[in-house]
Image (cartoon, grey):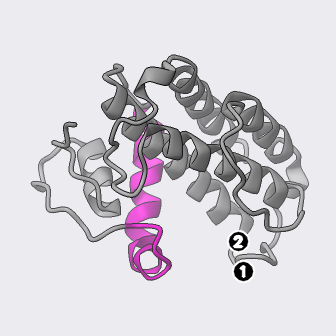
């Protein structure tokens, strides 16, 4: 918890800043996450924040709702739920994973969807190197499960000497060279 909360907090701040800067005119733009346009991606991010808030409080699985325009507020509530030490203990009854794994899943989501949104909307984005390292290590470990559950796409080949962030994108099925 002590090492992850600062990473989650800074990733939340970066990603929330990106969301706040998206004009409605870009809502229909494509994203590197092929099934989502920009509005759908933000809607998905809102749901993920709400879901991980609930999971951090040992609450129920929540279904995705319609676009609400409140990702930054939801993400702050998620941080609040995970700032409680008990959020990190044990296994989640909904997904059957250790709570520390769920926190890493949320970090991956913040970092990668931040990139998705930045790429789709032409915003600069530089994820924190330590967050990228943690997300890459977790994603490499969970790649098979992630693909089975439909969370990760097919791996995209990137050179072994590619930057760590490009390797993370490749592991989860994103092409680091994607452009709209």
Q: Front-most of 157 and 71?
A: 71
Q: Residue at x 39, y 54 (%)?
A: 136
Is-magenta flag for residue 131? yes
Q: Which residues are magenta?
A: 128-152
Q: Residue at x 46, y 43 (%)?
A: 113
Q: Which of the two marks, 1 or 2, is nearer to us in this view?
A: 1
Residue behind mark 1:
96
Does the rendering let one see residue 146? Answer: yes
Left or right: 105 with respect to 111? Answer: right
Q: Front-most of 103 and 72?
A: 72
Q: Position of residue 111 (x, y in %)?
A: 47, 41
Left or right: 52 with respect to 118? Answer: right
Q: Quadrant of residue 28?
A: top left
Left or right: 62 with respect to 64? Answer: right
Give SS at disc 2: loop
Relative height, residue 158 to residue 39 (above, below): below
Is-magenta flag for residue 129? yes
Q: Position of residue 175 (x, y in %)?
A: 21, 51
The C terminus lies in which quarter of the figure?
top left
Predominant secondary structure in magenta?
A: helix
């Amino acid at each position: 918890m002590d090492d992850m909360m600062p990473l989650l907090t800074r990733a939340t701040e970066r990603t929330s800043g990106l969301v706040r800067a998206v004009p409605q005119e870009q809502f229909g733009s494509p994203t590197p996450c092929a099934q989502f346009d920009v509005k759908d991606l933000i809607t998905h991010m809102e749901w993920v924040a709400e879901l991980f808030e609930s999971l951090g409080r040992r609450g129920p699985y929540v279904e995705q709702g319609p676009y609400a325009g409140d990702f930054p507020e939801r993400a702050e509530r998620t941080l609040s739920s995970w700032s409680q030490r008990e959020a990190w203990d044990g296994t989640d009854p909904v997904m059957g994973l250790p709570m520390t794994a769920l926190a890493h899943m949320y970090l991956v989501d913040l970092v990668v969807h931040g990139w998705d949104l930045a790429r789709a909307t032409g915003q600069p984005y530089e994820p924190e190197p330590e967050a990228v390292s943690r997300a890459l290590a977790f994603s490499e470990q969970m790649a098979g499960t992630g693909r089975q559950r439909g969370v990760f796409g097919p791996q995209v080949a990137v050179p072994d000497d590619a930057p760590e962030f490009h390797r993370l994108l490749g592991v989860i099925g994103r092409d680091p060279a994607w452009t709209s």
